[in-house]
Image (cartoon, rainbow, N blue to C red):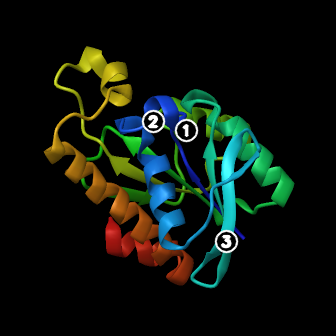
Amino acid sequence: MFLIVGLGNPESEYNNTRHNMGFDTINKLAKEYKIELNKNKFKGIYGTGIIENEKVLLLKPQTYMNLSGESIIEAVNFYKIDLQDLIIIYDDMDVEPGKIKIRKKGGPGSHNGMKSVIQNLNSEEFTRIRVGIGTPVHKNDMINYVIGKISSQEEKDKLNQGTDKAKEAIIEMIKNGVDTAMNKFN
């Protein structure tokens, strides 16, 4: 079973923000594969289903971004998920909008959600997809940039391209493995 986690903040308050690229990707996967995200457990909202003949659990932690690892570790422990079968999707300012980067392991960079994930899992050995959101004009405005509403249609379209690619990359990983997805999307 694959555990596929999108990082974000509760959508009632933070829908249409750059910080919710992970949630947006999970929503697209759920829609395409008709997986209902209607269960509450693991400090998150989740649903189970089948993607490309593989059982998956799609999870959106509801802990707010900086505590995402608390939700993920509960699901990992409950389902005894091998970290090789964990995929985490999140926003990244170091990646250009509309682009994604896939890595099999690595540190959290400056991303507080990933710091929480790595701390809770006590490992950096899991696949992650970084969805590009670009950087703010003023470097001292990073918090408002990531949690602020996306106002221009042009930017929305670019960010949508990124979450579409992330969704396709996950499907590719499930079908043909991480290396193939990295060759195709990085």
**Residue 104 spot, x, y in % from top left:** 52, 60
Which amino acid, by three-letter code, is at mark 2?
A: Gly
Tell me which residue sits at (29%, 46%) in the image: 95
Residue placed furthest toward the top: 140
Mark 2 highlights which residue? 109
Which amino acid, by three-letter code, is at mark 3?
A: Gly
Q: How crowded is mark 1: few (under 14 residues within 10 Å), some or many (20 or more)?
A: many
Q: Is residue 108 visible?
A: yes
Mark 1 highlights which residue? 114
Q: Which mark is residue 22?
A: none
Q: Is residue 52 above or below residue 152?
A: below
Quarter location, residue 68: top right
Q: Quick one: label 3 or label 2, which is nearer the N terminus?
A: 3
Mark 3 highlights which residue? 49
Residue contact between numbered discs 1 and 2, judged by CB atoms under 8 Å: yes
Tell me which residue sits at (17%, 44%) in the image: 153
**Residue 99 spot, x, y in % from top left:** 27, 56
